[in-house]
Image: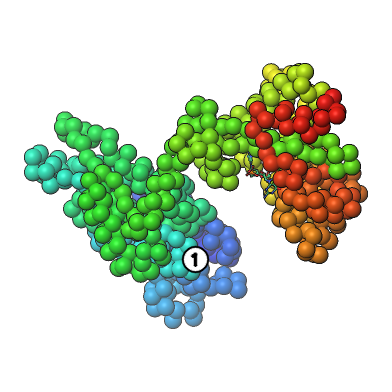
């Protein structure tokens, strides 16, 4: 214990008291005290949360607060250090209250001596250590050091209360090793213990790192792995966002456990069966959830072990389908399964095709053509949209150049493509576009990027910078699905846009719904004052087109003129549409 360094936090609004305390502590012969002094309640809270102190001294008088207020706050913030309350004259009667609230000791400042202070601190630290040891024994499993059943129940009930309050979800995974008894019987029990410990370490390590995978935001209860006894573990995942995320975690656990364990020279293979119950669907209270996760675990055993099962069968189907889809989406690029369709965009005044929007489809080797709504969200979640988007960009630029160079189409058109939010926020976007334009030789003024209103409006200030950089390259920019986000006029003015595409939902009932008609009319007027062209999306009838023309809309796109066409049909379609003027597009 000689020359042990002890970190003390002193909260006292009186500098003289700080100087006295510092002086008293410096008299110690065999310890060095690092004294941090803060004088306000707020600073104190910050220090308590950030700091790693061995002990805290709180003065009872802290401006409008008392040391007792701070004590309660510190205890609820799970302050690990023992706390000693310092009282002045006539405040001694708060002693019992302070001890009840969690203080380790209290000292009357008027009677304090160096010896007394030091003894109190030493005693507080020792007592805290003993308490911690007892707590560890009561709440942690000695073999694996994981939380035991008691602590697990405690965490689970807290997580459920939190989920109920914030209408969140959480998942309970019940994990049981497969054939553990055989391992235990054929090798020695000692090896069995080592295996349990090895499994615990892998689970704990993974679940901690998976915190961010399955969790959004900052919940105050983190994911927990516990050992219930024997070869049974539970994993609590808090704040999950989708069933698929839980399936992913379970799948990953199976993979992690499938790596051989080297235990005292023996190579041991292990696997596990996992049952999953989701709050609140599979139970709204702790016992039901535990029971159902356990049942699901037995289903997994019946299913042939080394797999996971949700308590509800429908969830198994959802999770499986999504995992399968994700796996094949990962391979879709190399299998060349993506195709582009092109939908013409028509100038209302002249009736000419002025551009085409490239729309992706996934030609799945087993399931046939899949529409973007059924895989773009998944591609965004998994980040696969980045390579897919790059493929679209290359394909579009290449195709446009081919059409421009071919003898069939004389007037070049603008091809537009949809940029996902993730792509838009990639630092490398500009470089990628520059490279593609360079390698295909396409003039940038024939490439248009469609970015949805909601993506543009998110972090509007950085968006302006990004858009300006894109504009400088000479490409065109279109605000897609306009009307569904919350653009304000003042922002629109700042964005260097070429046109806005009014969302289909406003066009659909434009002839019947006066309100929609009024909105569309207003958007057109507003956009024109900002020198933006207006494109109406999803025009399906002549009546819609007539009204749009009356409102002064510039261009339209929709089934009325043409559905999106496969690449091979584009040239043919255009020739048919303009028989007299094959020289114009
Ligand atoms: P979007 O960019 O708003 O594209 C317009 C959608 O409206 C297309 O659906 C198009 O087929 C559909 N549409 C066009 N005219 C009509 C009409 O008259 N009536 C109706 N009911 N629908 C019409 P699609 O091709 O299913 O694409 C849906 C969305 O998927 C697109 O919406 C776009 O946000 C996204 N998407 C498509 N291709 C890509 C891509 O290559 N990359 C990215 N990131 N997203 C894409
Ligand atoms: Mg679009
Ligand atoms: Mg759109």
Q: Nearer the viewer, residue 370 or 492?
A: 370
Image: 313 above or below 463: below
Q: Nearer the viewer, residue 537 or 327?
A: 537
Q: Nearer the viewer, residue 169 or 571?
A: 571
Rendering quarter of residue 14? bottom right
SS at mark 1?
loop
Q: Residue at x 18, y 53 (%)?
A: 230
Quadrant of the image containing the C terminus: top right
Here the colouring is rainbow
Is residue 14 toward the left or the right of residue 137 in the image? right
Rendering quarter of residue 344? top right
Q: Residue at x 84, y 24 (%)?
A: 583
Q: x, y percentage for residue 153?
A: 31, 64
Q: Residue at x 40, y 64 (%)?
A: 281
Q: Which residue is mark 1?
A: 167
Rendering quarter of residue 384? top right
């Amino acid at each position: 214990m000689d020359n042990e360094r002890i970190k003390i936090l002193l909260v006292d609004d009186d500098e003289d008291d700080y100087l006295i305390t510092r002086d008293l502590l410096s008299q110690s012969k065999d310890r060095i005290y690092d004294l941090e002094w803060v004088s306000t309640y707020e600073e104190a809270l910050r220090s308590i949360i950030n700091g790693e102190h061995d002990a805290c001294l709180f003065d009872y008088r802290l401006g409008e607060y008392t040391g007792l207020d701070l004590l309660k706050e510190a205890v609820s913030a799970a302050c690990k250090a023992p706390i000693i309350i310092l009282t002045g004259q006539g405040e001694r009667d708060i002693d019992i209250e302070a001890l009840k609230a969690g203080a380790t000791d209290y000292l009357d400042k008027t009677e304090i001596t160096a010896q007394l202070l030091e003894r109190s601190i030493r005693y507080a630290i020792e007592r805290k250590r003993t308490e911690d040891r007892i707590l560890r024994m009561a709440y942690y499993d000695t073999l694996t050091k994981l939380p035991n059943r008691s602590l697990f129940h405690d965490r689970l009930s807290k997580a459920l209360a939190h989920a109920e309050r914030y209408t969140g979800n959480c998942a309970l995974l019940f994990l049981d090793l497969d054939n553990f008894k055989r391992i235990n019987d054929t090798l020695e029990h000692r090896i069995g213990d080592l295996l349990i410990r090895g499994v615990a370490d892998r689970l704990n390590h993974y679940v901690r790192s998976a915190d961010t995978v399955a969790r959004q935001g900052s919940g105050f209860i983190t994911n927990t792995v516990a050992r219930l006894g024997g070869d049974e573990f539970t994993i609590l995942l808090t704040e999950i966002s989708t069933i698929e995320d839980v399936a992913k975690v379970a799948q990953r656990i199976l993979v992690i456990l499938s790596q051989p364990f080297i235990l005292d020279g023996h190579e041991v293979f292990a696997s596990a069966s996992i049952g999953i119950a989701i709050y609140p669907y599979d139970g709204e209270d702790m016992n039901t959830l535990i029971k159902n996760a356990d049942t699901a675990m037995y289903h997994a055993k019946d299913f042939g072990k080394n797999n996971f099962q949700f308590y509800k069968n429908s969830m198994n189907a959802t999770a499986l389908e999504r995992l399968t889809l994700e796996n094949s989406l990962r391979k879709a690029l190399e299998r060349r399964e993506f195709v582009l369709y092109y939908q013409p965009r028509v100038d209302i005044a002249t009736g000419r095709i002025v551009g085409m929007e490239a729309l992706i489809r996934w030609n799945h080797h087993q399931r046939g053509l899949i529409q973007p709504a059924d895989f773009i969200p998944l591609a965004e979640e998994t980040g696969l949209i980045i390579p897919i988007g790059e493929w679209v960009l290359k394909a579009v630029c290449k195709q446009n150049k081919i059409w421009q160079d071919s003898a069939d189409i004389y007037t070049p058109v603008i091809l537009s493509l949809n940029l996902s939010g993730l792509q838009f926020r990639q630092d490398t976007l500009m470089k990628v576009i520059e490279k593609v334009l360079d390698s295909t030789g396409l003039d940038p003024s024939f490439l248009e990027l469609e970015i949805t209103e909601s993506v543009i409006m998110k972090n509007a200030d950085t968006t302006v910078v990004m858009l300006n950089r894109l504009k400088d390259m000479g490409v065109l920019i279109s605000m897609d699905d306009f009307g569904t986000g919350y653009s304000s006029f003042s922002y629109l003015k700042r964005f260097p846009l070429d046109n806005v595409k009014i969302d289909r939902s406003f066009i659909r009932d434009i002839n019947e719904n006066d309100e929609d008609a009024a909105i569309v009319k207003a958007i057109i007027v507003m956009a024109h004052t900002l020198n933006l062209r207006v494109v109406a999306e999803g025009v399906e009838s002549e009546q819609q087109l007539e009204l749009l023309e009356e409102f002064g809309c510039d261009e339209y796109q929709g089934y009325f003129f043409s559905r999106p066409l496969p690449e091979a049909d584009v040239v043919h379609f255009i020739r048919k549409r303009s028989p007299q003027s094959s020289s114009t597009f």
